[in-house]
Image: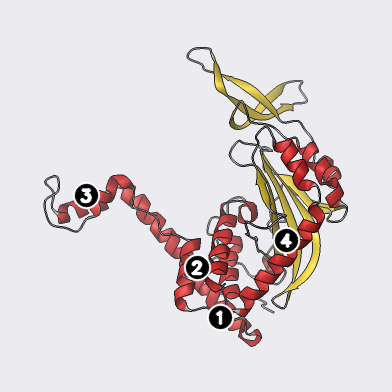
Amino acid sequence: MVNTIVTDSTYIPELAYRQTPWQANPLQLGVPSVTASEAIHMAGLAYPIIKEPMVIQRTGQVADVMAVGREVNYPTGESEFISFGTVSKDYTVMQATDIAEKLDPITDKYPVVSVGADSEGANIYMFLSAGTQSIAGEEHDLYFIIKDSRNGRRGLSFTFMPLRLACKNGLVYFNREATASATFHHIKSINQDVTSFSQGLLPRMADTMASAIQEFNHMAEVKITDSIVDKIVASAYPDPRLPRSLRWLSSENDSLMMGLTGAIRRTQLESSDAYSKYQKSVDNVQELKDSVASSYGTFNTRYAHKDLDNTAWALWNSIVEVEDHGRRTRGHSMASIVGDRASVKSRSFKTACELIS
């Protein structure tokens, strides 16, 4: 078992100082294995979400879009509407209490162990415990994550995630055919859609866990070439594209183009503020790739005695390691399991499975 992870180019903390993403989030509340309804009330998240008309200031007319959010009442007797975002008139709110009620039969078997929200309440999170299982010879805690975004940008999602206990990495599982994973947008049918989905969900959750564990174990058995490593890492961290407005300047051809030679165009390109931002993005992506390479090398060294070195499992865990613990700017701790960093894990997992199938 790995005791510490020491690398030259990453910002990955030693294992003794690590926390799970929800432990690191001060807005997440650990709860003693309760139902979804109990968790929502314990966390103070039972407040109603409302839609408010928006008025165009210049004309005084009611806009075609609405604001979604919640009303906050202060001890002074004053109240304030906290807007989460702008939505269409067809946007359908599903209250946290309604979501919880539909999950209660499930949380009798898979209880909620953590519940919380972001600072405004636009996003809520629940973690359902599904026990412990051995994957690739190590113990993993199993969770189903319920997230609802009430800001008009994302919807209600159900995701399966084992937590690798050796390093507290969240292994977000991606499979479009997973019957216990889904995303629901806030359209008129969301209440009925979620009701239908939740019926008979328990056996589907068991099927999803079995399928995921089988895929993870397969990844741990397959050795991969440098070429496959490059493809998986490239899917996780695609190279940024040069802004369209600058592409004509990037040509190395010395033939005249709008009166400028290739050398002059190159000078103009490199002096552009937009190019500086682009180059910074390139450097950031390369730093992430270097961090993965360093973590991958460490994993291979540490786990060679278990024959897990140079496997798809080793590489994907190295990507997860960087996303969970190695980002220079951490931001919101939940991003690694339900946000943009989770998308990095999903993309690379999908690519790895396709390449080793």
Crowd rating for badge 1 (residues with CA inside 10 Å; few <14, some 14–19, many 20+): some
Indicate which disc, 3 or 1, sits on the residue closer to the N terminus.
Answer: 1
Q: Which mark is residue 21?
A: none
Tag 2, which secondary structure? helix
How far apart marks 4 and 2 lie (CA) works out to 23 Å
Residue topped by disc 3: 268
| Quadrant in the picture for the C terminus | bottom right
Residue topped by disc 2: 232
Question: Residue at left 22%, top 49%?
Answer: 268
Question: Residue at left 70%, top 37%?
Answer: 190
Inspect the image, locate mark 2, and give the three-letter code of the amino acid beneath it.
Ile
Indicate which disc, 1 or 4, sits on the residue closer to the N terminus.
Answer: 4
Tag 1, which secondary structure? loop
4 vs 3, front mark? 4
Inspect the image, locate mark 4, and give the three-letter code of the amino acid beneath it.
Thr
Tag 4, which secondary structure? helix
Residue topped by disc 1: 223
Q: Is residue 37 rendered to the left or right of residue 64? A: right
3 vs 1, front mark? 1
How far apart marks 2 and 1 lie (CA) works out to 13 Å
Tag 3, which secondary structure? helix
How far apart marks 3 and 1 lie (CA) works out to 46 Å
Disc 4 + disc 3, Cβ < 8 Å: no
Q: Which mark is residue 208?
A: 4
3 vs 2, front mark? 2
Up-down relation of residue 181 to residue 95 (above or below): below
Question: Residue at left 16%, top 56%?
Answer: 263
Disc 2 + disc 1, Cβ < 8 Å: no
Q: Is residue 5 visible?
A: no
Q: Is residue 283 visible?
A: yes
Q: Residue 94 placed where, x, y %? A: 73, 35
